[in-house]
Structure formats: structure tokens, C-alpha cells
Image (cartoon, grey):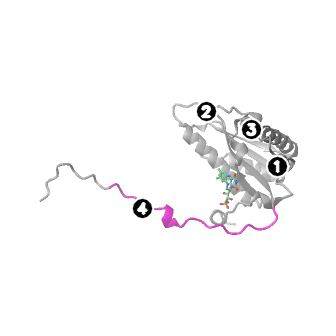
Amino acid sequence: MEMIDLLLKRRSVSVRLITEPGPSEEQLDLILRAATRVPDHGKLAPWRIQILRKDGQRRLGDFLAALFAREMPEANEKQIEFERQRPQRAPLLLVVTSKPRPSPKVPELEQLLSGGAVCQNILVAAQALGVAANWITEWPAFRPEVVEHLGHDPATDRILGFFYLGTASERPDERPRPALEDVVSEWAGAPAPAAENEDVA
Ligand SMILES: Cc1cc2nc3c(=O)[nH]c(=O)nc-3n(C[C@H](O)[C@H](O)[C@H](O)COP(=O)(O)O)c2cc1C
């Protein structure tokens, strides 16, 4: 497929529709190489990617279930089990974390955006290889306990996304996209401010 067709037809596959098998080792290597080839001002590589195979997914699930149960004493077994299964919903899970580095030249926002590019490249590379992928945050991405449990510093580092990878059980429907005219405009300069005390003839 032409690259432009891929970009114009790209679609995520909902995690509900992702099943076995996961990507091969060769596909995973290609996805990771594409993911890390992103604009990165100052060559800081201010992001990390973690690969969670079955053991990692299970252990993260156990952690989420325990955290959820601790914070929601009224939660029932079914809800706790759902949290345990959350990271185990697809054959392979990638976690992308932003790890900003102190830099006088590269603002933190740029480093964060570079991480967003890593995330998007994962989706595009996966689709190019026929691997189904879904970029999800959900509550665990925003919890410092989870950031720390994954070995990062909650004071500085942020989870940008969990990427569920596998095989699509069905083809996703088309998803409406914004009309170009709603989000794109021409700009050729701001109107000149009205001069003060301008003589009106
Ligand atoms: C940063 C980020 C976080 C997201 N988190 C979630 C999420 O937690 N749950 C969800 O259903 N979709 C989430 N999405 C949306 C999906 O990844 C996806 O964009 C959406 O289903 C449309 O897919 P497509 O435009 O890639 O086809 C998130 C998207 C982004 C960019």
C-alpha cells in the first residue's frame, strides 16, 4: 500500500476486537524502530517504550486490581477482576512514557510532543504491517502509583499511552473525521489594529 493511502485510511482497532496472535518478533522490531525514528529536538530521546508480554501484563494486572480494590472498598469481585484483566486484553502491550530531560534549549512541551510522535508511529507502523493496534490511556495512565510501579519517576515522567497489539477479529468501521474547513483555515496576517485618534474624514 502506498504510504499516503495508509495515512488516509488508517484506523485503530478497538481493543475489544484485538485477538491472538500478537506481532512476530520481526514485526515488533520494525514497529519499535519506526517508533523511535521521530522528530526529537536536541536528540534527547525523552521517551521510553516498555514491552509487556504475558508475565508483565499479568503482573501489571495484579497491581491494578490491588490498587483499585484498595481505593474502592465497595468494589465487587467482578470489577476487581476486570481491572486485573485490563492490561491482558491483547497479545502484546507496549507502554510509552515521556521522560523529559532538563534542557535549556528544548522546552518540556516539545519533549512531550516528540513522545506523541512515538505513539503515532507505533500506530502507523503496526497498521503498515497488518498488526491491529489501539492507543489507550484509561485511568492507569494518570496514576502516579502506576508510573512508579512501571519503574518511572512520577515527579517528572508521564505515561502517554498503552498500546494493545494483536490481530483484528473484524475490520473496524469507518470513523467520521472533521471536515477540513472546520479545522483548517488560511491565515495571511492579522488585521492591522485601528490607529488611535485616527482622523475620520
Ligand atoms: C492520548 C490518547 C489517549 C486515548 N485514550 C483512549 C482511551 O482511554 N479509551 C478509548 O476508548 N480511546 C482512547 N483514545 C482514542 C483511540 O486511540 C483512537 O484514537 C480512537 O479509537 C479512533 O481511532 P483512529 O482514529 O486511530 O481510527 C485515545 C487517543 C489518544 C490520542
Position of 137 relative to 176 (above/below): above
| Residue linked to disc 4 | 186
* Label 2 – label 4 distance at C-alpha: 36 Å
| Residue linked to disc 2 | 101
- On the picture, is 35 further left or further right than 131? left
* Label 3 – label 1 distance at C-alpha: 18 Å
**Residue appearing at x 73%, y 35% in the figure:** 145
Counting other residues with Cα less than 10 Å from the Cα at mark 4, is it few (<14), some (14-19), or many (20 or more)?
Answer: few
Q: Nearer the viewer, mark 2 or mark 1?
A: 1
Three-letter residue code for mark 4: Glu
| Residue linked to disc 3 | 146
- On the picture, is 148 further left or further right than 59? left
Q: Are marks 2 and 1 in contact (CB under 8 Å)?
A: no
Q: Position of residue 149 (x, y in %)?
A: 77, 35
The stretch in magenta equals: 168-190
Label 2 vs 3, first from the N-terminus: 2
